Image: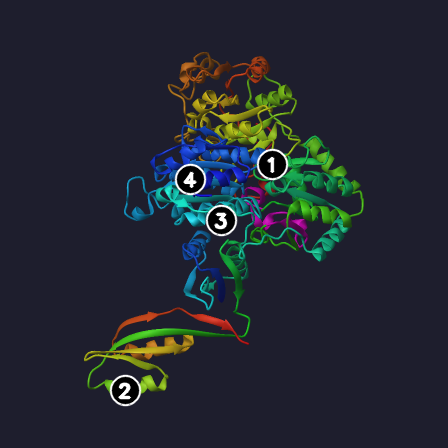
Amino acid sequence: MQHIISVLVENRFGVLANISSLFSARGFNIDSLAVGETHDPSISRMTILVTGDDRIIEQVNKQLNKLIDVIKVSDLTEEEHIERELMLLKVSHTDRTRSEIVQLVEIFKARIVDYCPKTITIQIVGSPEKITAFIEIMRSFGIKEVARTGRIALLRG
Amino acid sequence: MDKTGADILVDGLIKEGVEVMFGYPGGAILDVCDSIYKSKIKFILTRHEQGAAHAADGFSRSTGRMGVCMATSGPGAINLVTGIATAYMDSIPMVALTGQVPTSMIGNDAFQEADTVGITRPVTKYNYLVKDVKDLPRIIKEAFYIASTGRPGPVLIDIPKDVQKAVYKNYSYPDKVDLRSYKPVYEGHPNQIAKAAKEIEKAKKPLLYCGGGAISSNAYEEILKLAETCDIPVTTTLLGHGCFPETNPLALKMLGMHGTQYANYAMAETDLIIAVGARFDDRVTGKLDEFAPNARGRVIHIDIDPSAISKNIPVSIPIVGDCKTVLQELLKHTKPKKNPEWIKQIMEWKTKYPLTYRRDDDLLHPQFVVEQIYEVTKGDAIIVTEVGQNQMWAAHYYKYTRPRTFLSSGGLGTMGYGFPASIGAKMGNPDKLVIDIAGDGSIQMNIQELATAVVNNIPVKIVILNNGYLGMVRQWQELFYQREYAFTDLSRYLKKDMKWEDIKKDPKLFVPDFVKLAEAYDALGIRVTRKEEVAPALEKAFSSPKVAIVECLVEREENVFPMIPSGASVKQMMGGMA
């Protein structure tokens, strides 16, 4: 099962390498990893998606906690939390498809952030299901490129 | 006070109590060398950086004080890696210092540049690249703290040359560490400890299973007290040797792949495992599904590292904390008890299935040599081993009664560990007899350190069990690869049908001639080919003020038994007799 793990770490040189090498050394699979500074510039938050059975997830938690630079590890999977992911998607458009694309952007509450003669770049924020659905729908128009942030999450309340 | 980075480093080392260190110089660490040279620290120049790392490890294991090693950038740092990884796998505190190219050149593929922090990341507890001399005092303080607390381990500090030269105005050394992200837990949870005491009271066949953590937390007295108060037999891992006196009737010696039959039977039969600073590794458990079937759901595990608990087998009462502290607390809750049935059974096994080999012939068996070492030293020595058959025989046929008297590379199984580690151990214990029990394969991996030992007058003793083979691998080939001895024969001219008695008459069949080698280094060299020569040779070597090699030409195809094949269970244990 996929778990979403939120890790507060010291915002220091080498910390990302420490975490990613832990995952590769122990044979854990990272599905996605997002890193950013928090409101305290000395601390970063990493949101890690990892798939594994209970035993593996327990080890992931313990091994993360063991790293010197890790301040706190929380497994949000079973807790009430909010998850978001942001995607930029570049798609081809023609006179024939343009209005349909614009309509779909509205339906999905996405935004057009760049418009060129041959391509439109769309920004969409949401749950992983919504983003996957949007990719599927855009596929027929000819997707040029996609960039995703990976999921980030916070506990509710 | 204004100080350069190099002087700050040496000042820090002295403030942390470092008196001895091991290392090798080079361009990128010259400023540090210069500062050490002018200080009161005793610096042992090894002949290879790997030797320096193992020596620091041996110093640390045998004394409980911090082992420190040093090397230059690039190849120097990389040569330390095997030694650092050895210490990491066995949770040995160590501080490794490396030079690095100047900060302006990092990443430019400069001469003798390597990404030392990148290379050592998976084999250190923590590592630092110092980019600003102002960070250096804090980093030194933290490095010593991190290496020696919690589950100990090696910490590396990589110091660019310009940082060594940079001057820090108004420098002062910090007196405490403030790490919000690193707070090891020492006290066990009181409820868990109370639960554990109840389980011990209920258990009919309890078994203490103690590992390296028992040694590093100095829990010797507590284990002895718990075992005797509650009548619990004690088995140890390879690294646990010495945490319980093997002369005590409750001692079962080592368990696992090459454990004693009685220790493995006890593990198969026990209804309560009390694991103390041990990690249920594969050499101990064998096939996980069949490990300790009667103790399912009744496993107490005391360990300072939460990630060691329930990693391989499910634990019913995890207690995270320092072994010594937790056991002291546990002892307040335990009442004296007896387990007469269980102890009777254990004693039966011990009588029926002792460790044994062919004692009734005239041949020189390696096990006999180890027994003689025990007799001659009366058990009062620090035994260091290499890796392979020599290591197992050293574990089997010597009785360890005090902690920190058996030093061996358990986790990583590093051939070439023993000799440099014994140099470190001797530096830490100048009044003790330090003996490296070696094979002819392992000893050649760091034989260059003979110069270090002789030049610095560090009179360690090496006993080589020479069978002209990489014996342990040959044993596996004999048992599992149809006796095809691929790349394990170290001798020359030998033919399969040659008689051992004839072989022994011509020592030229073995390369090198270890006696001549010893003499070339101005050490004492003695060759032994017969049983009755062993004790006199050992006595002569041990009483000599010199570094000494005793080369014993032992039975070539002796095997280490008992043996549970890799991945098998106690049911598949192979015999007690060679």
Q: Are marks 1 and 3 in contact (CB under 8 Å)?
A: no
Whether residue B484 is in magenta: the answer is no
Three-letter amino acid code at disc 3? Arg
Q: Relative to A48, does residue B364 appear above or below in the rendering?
A: above
Tell me where residue B469 appears, x and y as whole percent.
45, 26
Which is in the foreground here, disc 3 or disc 2? 3
Three-letter amino acid code at disc 4? Ala
Which chain is indicated by disc 4? B
Q: Which residue is denoted by mark 4 in the rendering?
A: B6
Three-letter amino acid code at disc 1? Gly
User: Are the residues flagged by discs 1 and 2 from a single subunit?
Assistant: no
Which chain is indicated by disc 3? B
Residue B342: image quadrant is: top right
Labels in figure, total? 4
Q: Which residue is denoted by mark 1 in the rendering?
A: B259
Q: Would residue A114 appear left or right of B428 to someone viewing this image?
A: left
Q: Would residue A57 appear left or right of A31 to someone viewing this image?
A: right
Q: How far apart, in angstroms, are the residues tagged by discs 4 and 3?
A: 14 Å
Circle 1 residues within 10 Å: few <14, some 14–19, many ≥20 = many
First in sequence: mark 4 vs mark 3: 4
Which chain is indicated by disc 1? B
First in sequence: mark 1 vs mark 3: 3
Is residue B410 visible in the rendered structure shown here?
no
Is residue B257 visible in the rendered structure shown here?
yes
Q: Which residue is denoted by mark 2 in the rendering?
A: A100
Q: Relative to B559, does residue B156 appear above or below in the rendering?
A: below
Tell me where residue B56 appears, x and y as whole percent.
50, 34
Q: Which residue is denoted by mark 3 in the rendering?
A: B138
